[in-house]
Image (cartoon, rainbow, N blue to C red):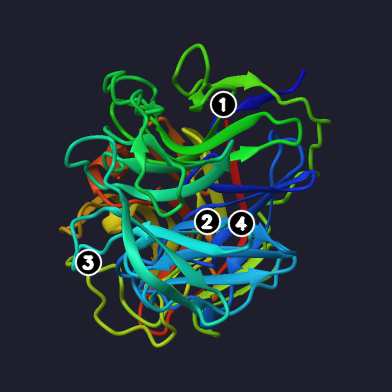
Amino acid sequence: MHQLTNPLLPGFYPDPSICRVGDDFYMVTSSFSYFPGVPVFHSRDLCHWEQIGHCLNRPEQLPLDWQHISGGIYAPTIRWHDGLFYMVTTNVSSGGNFYVTAEDPAGPWSNPVHIRGAAGIDPTIFWDEDGTAYMTATTDWAEHKPDVWIAQIDLQENCIVGERRIAWQGAMVNAWSPEAPHIYRKDGWYYLMIAEGGTEDYHAVTIARSRDILGPYEGYPGNPILTHRHLGLDYSICNVGHGDLVQLQDGSWYMVALASRLYGGYHKNMGRETFIAPVDWSGEWPVVSPGTGRVEWTYPAPALPEHPFPPQDQDDFRALCWNTLGTPGPETFTAEKSRLTLRSGMDWLVPDGLPRLLAPNGCPGFYARRQQHMRFSAGVTLTVPAAGEAGLMLLQHGFNHLRIGLRRTEDGVRAEVVRSEKCGKPDYLNPRDYPRHVDVLWAGSCDEPQVRISLCAEGQRHFFTVNGQRVAEADGSFLGSETAGGFVGAYVGCYVSGSGAEAVFADFRYQGE
């Protein structure tokens, strides 16, 4: 029998939301300041998932401030109603709460429709049995202590109707960060499920219910229904929370939620990932992961036909897994199957961490994919640019990063491994010069030096090579979200820095185990 294996979506895929339409399941996750935004996944058995697109893949849909990596898109919700998919979310960097729609979840999705009167973050839309639509979200700090509000929404006029009522303040007294609300109707009750406790160790899923959708809501005496905060800081799955429920055709229930994997100590380099657990809702309240009450690494699969998808070539530079940091301009990159031309409009890798020039194309020269494994290797062949610096980078929030970069010199090529933490003065590890007589770098042309560089990780030990020769080693534990802060996870990929610099990359390979 096939199994559900956690994490369901490995790597930085937080705040999952799920819906079922017939025999098909669809899921979206947060993307913060990475473009395209809000990846969309499809499954038919809950075990196997394929990415089919992004909800926000056009610049006019997604203006982003790349310098605030943990800004941008927060906590999307995906729902289906009357033949149309809705994805509702918050762009905390520009415009606030909005939704987009599509007949096909693979796209195209509409331009954003901003909702008047809908303050706060983490919005959800719910349709009652009579077709009336309601929105829930978290109140804005500027107007109210964070609580969860609910109100009727007019989707023709795109505005809140009447009063926004405080629906619930969370299970704990003075609950920290009540957010991520979702509403479900079952057996004559409206259930309001939220996250609280912040996004780190005390994260949790709690639930309340009411006979009236507008409340008041009464909390479940057994809250929280899911958390790992009682398991200690050395438990291998931590900060579990921010869930969404889905009911299968046979009446069974499952929850998707975010959590992080620890490795090399209390470090979470990959950030918050998507996990899944079965739910017993035969009683009045849902019981998550019956028998253990915690998220396990595996579960028996639901009673659905197994439906694997053909493997996707994620090393293809055109694959859906690749992102830029910030909204790119038309000249930022040109991606072919195995060849990438990446351009930079500024020096953005400088000691104080601030760009010396504004980027005319709207974002730095960074084109990358998520780190998804504790042990992995990433390598690429780089044609060293005539000006500026280019190479491979492993990037976390706050511009904490490890990189191996190459630049031209008068006598050849200089390779540098750099460790940069919290925008402080970077550490240069064992820089090396390769003079022109090292023919292997030039691949037969003195004008176009080509170098194979790689970054390999064995837990928190990271190794860097030039043409297969190891040149440096660095500890990567400072790349954990608990150290770097923020809400994202590590990305690995290609970069170029320097005003007007352009670099060509070929034959990228990522392998994990």
Estimate the spatial distance between the alpha carbons at disc 1 and disc 2, rounded to whole Å: 20 Å
Residue nearest the observer in this picture, 93 or 394: 93
- Give percent across and percent down for residue 116: 40, 79
Assign a secondary structure to mark 4: strand
For disc 3, the marked residue is 353
10 Å neighbourhood of mark 3: few (<14), some, or many (≥20)?
many
Residue 212, position as x, y percentages in the image: 45, 49
* CA separation in Å, label 4 and label 3: 40 Å
Q: CA distance from mark 1 to mark 3?
A: 46 Å
| Residue with the most extreme bottom position | 360
Q: CA distance from mark 2 to mark 3?
A: 34 Å
Circles 4 and 2 in contact, beta carbons < 8 Å: yes
Residue shown at the point (26%, 47%) measured from the top left: 177
Q: SS class of the residue under badge 1? A: strand
Of the two numbered discs 4 and 3 on the same chain, state the one appearing first in sequence. 4
The N terminus lies in quadrant: top right
Q: Position of residue 88 (x, y in %)?
A: 51, 64
Task: Give the quarter of the image for residue 160.
Answer: bottom left
Q: Residue 77 shows which numbered tag? A: 2
Judging by the rendered image, the residue that carries numbered circle 4 is 79
Query: What residue is disc 1 on?
Result: 279
Q: In front here: 282 or 349?
A: 282
Please name which of the two marks, 4 or 3, marks the residue nearer to the observer: 4
Instruction: Please state which amino acid type lies under the numbered disc 1.
Output: Val
